[in-house]
Amino acid sequence: MMRSQIHTLPPLTNAERLHSEQLTALIRDELQRAGGWLNFERFMELALYAPGLGYYSAGAHKLGVGGDFVTAPEVSPLFGRCVANQCAAVLATLQGGGILELGAGSGVMAADMLLQLAALNCVPEHYYILEVSADLRARQQNLLQQRVPHLFHRLQWLQELPTNFVGVIVANEVLDALPVQRFCIIQGAVQALGVTCDAQQFKWQSRAPSDSLKQAVHAISNYTGQVFAEGHHSEINLRLTPWIHSLAAALQRGAMLFIDYGLSQAEYYAAARMHGTLACFFRQRMHDDPFVNVGLQDITAWVDFTAVAAAGFSAGLKLQGFATQAHFLLGAGLDRLLTDSSEMLTAEQRWQQSQQIQKLTLPNEMGESFKVMAFAKDCDVQLSGFAFRDLRDRL
């Protein structure tokens, strides 16, 4: 984990500064009403999702070149096409059904998936998008009207999860944006790491943990055998289980695909990561201070995929596979798609495509840090994305 690199961040415009000050004032007011200390989970929730002011609620260029970060669908259309291949396998097994994408970002992956599904003659009757950001929803609609006008009538934006859904639920870089709690070890005891305010500046402050946080940290120690050293601090997502349960309740039959950067629990809480995984992104720069540029930067934490698997199991889902992004893409037909597409490209385009694929698959890029996990419910489907290498035994 990198240490803070605040001095490298670009300066704010006057409008950005005013926006951040408004959200800072809102959080400070809630902090004062709470007695001067706020659970970090609540701080992160407000910073990202406060209506009209939070990072994902307000209008800003977040994704792709010129934004704060780049996701795999923006790197190459082959990413979405590989995901579509897996969705097609599920829809074929179900003999129908739809696709529900959670947090569709710029809309690029939806466009790429729909084009690939059309090529496979497997376009679902409905492609649903559940998006909490009105700004992103508008951007998605504009992009998809341009990219897939002939399929736009299949798209439908939702405000909440559907009921009795049959099909595939896809979530690319959604789990890392769920608000997390933070904890630290002080004098051998678990402490909650929260937020206070001093001289108009937010800062960290520890206090006695809730029973649920304390029990969760002890459960991690028991499962992994990890004895947390003095000063170790990290993140834990106590919202994960109820969130997965809500998805499982919405899914009548079908599968779920989660794609995100993350680790098994033993790796996540290893001594080498004693500073945790919290990361912030602002204009393509990564740092570890969530208290600057509030409302203007993304705040994320890596995903504990062992906890995701446990949540799915407790919700009655069947774990279908767990793999690195590189192995998943290869199993889902990346090589075949490359061969088919390269015949129509110029030499320069082939070089650009090669660079994109390296970004998606190399270990020092997105290939190993990003993982893919799949669940099924009343759907006996074998997904080729996990045929190369399945890492379920590491969970």
Image (cartoon, rainbow, N blue to C red):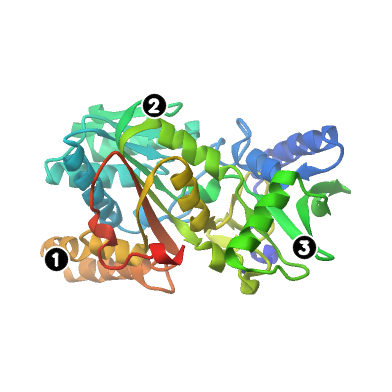
Tell me: residue 351, above or below residue 40. Answer: below
Residue at image point 37% right, 67% down: 359
Q: CA distance from mark 1 to mark 2?
A: 38 Å
Element under label 2? loop
> Relative to the observer, which residue lies in front, 15 or 163?
163
Residue 95: x, y in percent?
Answer: 16, 35
Q: Which residue is mark 1?
A: 339
- Left or right side of 378 for 187: right
Neighbour tally class for label 3: few under 14, some 14-19, many 20 plus, Cα within 10 Å: some
Q: Which mark is residue 305?
A: none
Tell me: residue 327, above or below residue 205. Answer: below
Q: Which mark is residue 162?
A: 2
Q: Is residue 2 visible?
A: no
The reply to whether callout 1 and callout 2 are in contact (CB within 8 Å) is: no
Element under label 3? strand
Amino acid type indicated by mark 1: Thr
Tell me: residue 303, above or below residue 271. Answer: above
Q: Nearer the viewer, mark 2 or mark 3?
A: 3
Element under label 1? helix
Amino acid type indicated by mark 2: Pro
Neighbour tally class for label 1: few under 14, some 14-19, many 20 plus, Cα within 10 Å: few
> Relative to the observer, which residue lies in front, 12 or 340?
340
The reply to whether callout 2 and callout 3 are in contact (CB within 8 Å) is: no
Q: Which residue is mark 3?
A: 185
Q: Is residue 127 visible?
A: yes
Residue at image point 54% right, 58% down: 302
Tell me the quarter of the picture where residue 43 sits: top right
> Relative to the observer, which residue lies in front, 325 or 47?
325
Amino acid type indicated by mark 3: Ile
Tell which residue pokes out farthest to the right in this image: 199
Q: Nearer the viewer, mark 1 or mark 2?
A: 2
Q: CA distance from mark 2 to mark 3?
A: 41 Å
